[in-house]
Image: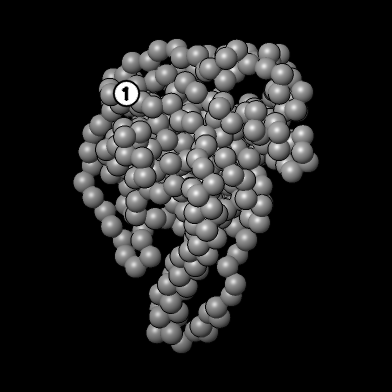
Amino acid sequence: MDLCGVNVKNNLLYPTNSFSYGTTRSSFYNAEITNCKHFQRRRIPFLVVTANAGGKKKKNNNHGGGGNGDQSIPEGKNDGDKSNNNSDKRAHVNLDWREFRAKLYRDELKEIADADTHKEGGALHISKPLETKWAHPIPVPETGCVLVATDKLDGIRTFERTVILLLRSGTRHPQEGPFGIVINRPLHKKIKQMNPKNHDLVTTFSDCSLHFGGPLEASMFLLKSGEKLKLPGFEEVVPGLYYGARNCLDDAAGLVKKGIIKPHDFSFFVGYAGWQMDQLRDEIESEYWYVAACSSSLLYKALTDSSEGLWEEILQLMGTQD
């Protein structure tokens, strides 16, 4: 589908790695993107709620660019009413669970600090409500988590200092593998500047912002609904934040025309990042990515052109950067 024309080239210069790359064309925007394949990986020391975990380094292939096998193109959710109702129930549980886990993590760090303070005769911390913005490491990827590039990806332009929102972890649909989108690379362009040919993009979404989402072909959008409004037909990533692909574009335009959602609640992404099932795990073990959970308020930045500072902000909240 030739919807709009934007040229996003990513020339990767990393002389110590052997890689190949080819140009793919986004079916959503008719956008040329560089589809890169790298050969090398990294492993991350994970800080869990109760302990630190480390591991040995491994080598693997193709950061976020798919493996040698077939890579399915992600599509938006389009299940029946029963599935949507179950999704709604899970969303409320996930909201409480994510925030509860974050508070547990924060309080445990404070307990450790209090123990040290008590030994030194200092004042103890008083427990406070969870902050609006939070981020903390988690041991394994999950839907709605973020992958934060470490310094081992410095010099690889496609993924250097990127934050990838994992739209699916691959555990529910293991045949497709995990995939997500880069959320801190705004292109500082509106869809109308790309001369789109699709009617909905020309009219309903013409003023929506455009972002680089990854090196693989197929593009999608993020949609912020707020935590109380549920949207059947779209897949919820974290409470209040949904994603859709080209098969959901008509439904998305319908929500805007009915006044349920505003156009500025959408952001469109050119391309995505995807892995084979064991590939992402190998990259994490080889310390190419930090894996973190973060608050919805941070993820909402992906809908704005000010998302470029997200990498530094999440690392600071995780305590990995001063």
Residue, x 63% and y 16% (percent of image)?
Answer: 3
Residue, x 62% and y 28% (percent of image)?
Answer: 249
User: Percent x, y for residue 72?
Assistant: 38, 27
Q: Quadrant of the N terminus?
A: top right
Classify mark 1: residues with Cα within 10 Å, few (<14), some (14-19) or many (20+): few
Towards the viewer: 22 or 40: 22
Residue, x 68% and y 13% (percent of image)?
Answer: 197
Residue type beneath disc 1? Asp
Residue, x 31% and y 34% (percent of image)?
Answer: 175
The residue tagged 1 is: 70
Q: Left or right: 311 with respect to 112? A: right
Mark yes or no: residue 172 visible: yes
* Among the 4 quarters of the image, the one containing residue 190: top right
Residue 23 higher or lower than 299, as above or below: above
User: Percent x, y for residue 90?
Assistant: 49, 57
* Among the 4 quarters of the image, the one containing residue 170: top left
Towards the viewer: 1 or 163: 1
Mark yes or no: residue 319 visible: no
User: Percent x, y for residue 299?
Assistant: 58, 47
Residue 25 higher or lower than 256, as above or below: above
